[in-house]
Amino acid sequence: MELTGTVIALLPEVTGQGKNGAWRKQEFILEIPSQYPKKVCIALWGDKIDQANLQINDSVTASIDVESREYNSRWYTEVKAWKVDKAGSGNSGSNSGGQPLPPVTTFSEDESDDLPF
């Protein structure tokens, strides 16, 4: 799922130690434009905090997962971003991770096409 909007707040980074080692989390508030704008709190975890390099007023598209979990008979829901793209970041020729794009497969006209349309 993707959400597009403007970063209106950056919450302080939180760190801790878990059974799998140290962890980092930073939440930001994304305002989604509409007749009645909505605000969504989205969490970034680990190295994704540095990769996103978010600033207030950035226009972004966040690819998210929504997850709920139970603790002491109460349910908690978290919206986690697994990718954040800034608007106008020039991603048309390359990807945001700095890695080369996969090769493009091309077909010649003499190859048969099994598709009925």
Image (cartoon, helix red, strand yellow):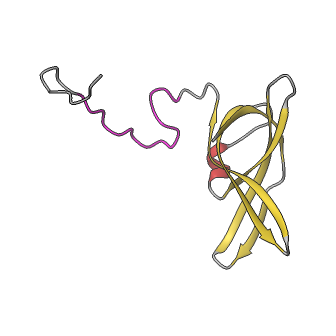
- Rendering coords of residue 77 (x, y %): 78, 57
Q: Is residue 16 above or below residue 64?
A: below
108 magenta-colored = no
Front residue of this view, candidates 114 and 28: 114
Q: How many marks?
A: 0
- Rendering coords of residue 84 (x, y %): 63, 41
Residue at the image position 76 percent from the left and 70 percent from the top: 16
104 magenta-colored = yes
Q: Residue furthest bottom?
A: 19
Residue 29 quadrant: top right
Q: Is residue 82 above or below residue 69?
A: above
Q: Is residue 105 above or below residue 21?
A: above
The stretch in magenta equals: 91-106
Residue at the image position 61 percent from the left and 47 percent from the top: 51
Q: Residue furthest front?
A: 116
Q: Residue furthest top?
A: 109
- Rendering coords of residue 93 (x, y %): 44, 27
Front residue of this view, candidates 29 and 37: 37
